[in-house]
Amino acid sequence: MAEDQMVTFSLASEEFGIDIMKVQEIIRIPPITRVPKARDFIEGVINLRGNVIPVVNLRVRFGMPLEKETDLSRIVVLQINGKVFGIRVDGVTEVLRLNSESIEPPPPIALGMDANFIRGVGKIGERLLILLKPDQLMDGDVINEQTA
């Protein structure tokens, strides 16, 4: 039976999962430098041990209301196709294994989010986990500008 290992995190009252193989690390929120004329969901850039990486605010990306940062707020640093960027989340919940049988395709209405972001919905007992496609969270042109 195939299993996916996921890092789960929360945004508002929703729980999301992302493939652990795409996660480089999870960090507290450092100072974020705004970038002029960046897309609205790009919160800015951070210095991660000498590397400048862009940070996507997932609340903005998914059209959710903004909240104040808390002690639980984190940046999940992802590495996708050799590109590194961070996503700001309200809190990281856990790392868990999910049987591929318990993953459903995204619902047709796509939960009010752009269906491109959603790989599926994972069922863990009574919990539902929205599984994200991390390569869709950042526009390709933004990543490419960053490394060009």
Image: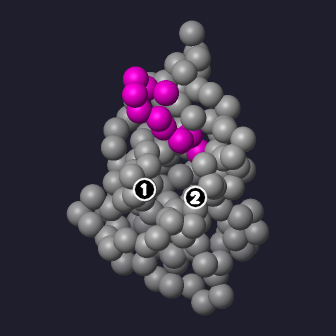
- The quarter of the image holding the C terminus is bottom right
Residue 84: assigned label: 2
Q: Which residue is mark 1?
A: 11
> Where residue 39 appears, x then y in whole percent?
65, 78
Residue that sits furthest to the front in the current view: 109
Q: Which residues are magenta?
A: 123-132
Q: How many marks?
A: 2
Badge 1 density bin: few <14, some 14–19, many ≥20, Cα 10 Å: some
Q: Main secondary structure of the magenta part?
A: strand
Residue shown at 27% from the left, 58% from the top: 72
- Check disc 1 and give the amino acid type: Leu
C-alpha gap between disc 2 and disc 1: 21 Å
Mark yes or no: residue 82 visible. no
Residue 108 lies in what quarter of the image? Answer: top right
Asked if the stretch drawn in magenta spans residue 129, the answer is yes
Badge 2 density bin: few <14, some 14–19, many ≥20, Cα 10 Å: many
Name above or below for residue 101 compared with residue 121. above
Name above or below for residue 106 compared with residue 86. above
Residue 111: assigned label: none
Residue that sits furthest to the top in the current view: 1
Residue shown at 63% from the left, 55% from the top: 113
Residue shown at 35% from the left, 49% from the top: 92
- The quarter of the image holding the N terminus is top right
Instruction: Give the label, 2 or 1, closer to the camera.
Output: 1
Residue that sits furthest to the bottom in the current view: 36
Tell which of 126 and 5 is nearer to you. Answer: 126
Which type of secondary structure does the marked residue at label 2 adopt?
A: strand
- Check disc 2 and give the amino acid type: Val
Name above or below for residue 83 compared with residue 24. below
